[in-house]
Image (cartoon, rainbow, N blue to C red):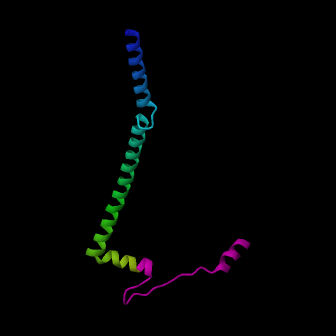
Amino acid sequence: MLRVTIAILLLAILWMQYRLWLAPDGMQDVWRLRKAVAEQREENRILRERNTSLEAEVRDLKEGLEAVEERARTELGMIEEGETFYQVIEDADDGEQDDRQ
């Protein structure tokens, strides 16, 4: 009777160890979830930094005209009244002549 009890207890321990280490819902699942949490925290950190940057840009656009003026100049090519805009265009022939000399 004692041997049967020991055998049953040993089988129970082996079964529990299997469930803990090798079953899909055991430690493998814990490790997978920890990795997923770490990846999500990193993504959240990156998004938080991006949001902070966007908040600063929105604040600049709402409060100051400097950011609006800069965007108008760089993105739309606008100039202020009374300003003169000069555009210098390189002559393509000049570059070819320099190469031949």
Q: Give coordinates of residue 38: x percent, y percent.
A: 38, 45
Let me know if residue 101 appears in the view: no
Say which residue appears at 35% left-offset and 54% top-offset: 44
Q: Is residue 98 magenta?
A: yes
Instruction: Tell me the residue at 37%/90% (across/down).
Output: 82
Residue 33 on the magenta span: no
Of residues 13 and 21, which is closer to you in this image? 13
Task: Write the residue at 46% across / 31% down.
Answer: 22
Q: Position of residue 16 (x, y in %)?
A: 40, 26
Query: In the rendered image, is residue 81 in sight?
Result: yes
Q: Quadrant of residue 84?
A: bottom left
Residue 10 against residue 82 in the figure, above or below: above
In the rendered view, would you say 20 is above or below 85? above
On the image, the x and y values in percent for residue 81 come to: 36, 89
The quadrant holding residue 99 is bottom right
82 relative to 16, above or below: below
Residues shaded magenta: 73-101
Count the numbered circles shown: 0
The one nearer the camera, 91 or 24, is 24
Where does the image place residue 1, in percent across and percent down from the top left? 38, 9
In front: 75, or 82? 75
Residue lying at the far top in this picture: please name it.
Answer: 2
Q: Residue at x 57, y 81 (%)?
A: 89
Q: Furthest residue to the left?
A: 63
Quarter of the rendering occupied by the C terminus: bottom right
> Which residue is the extreme one toward the front?
1
| Residue sitting at the far bottom | 82
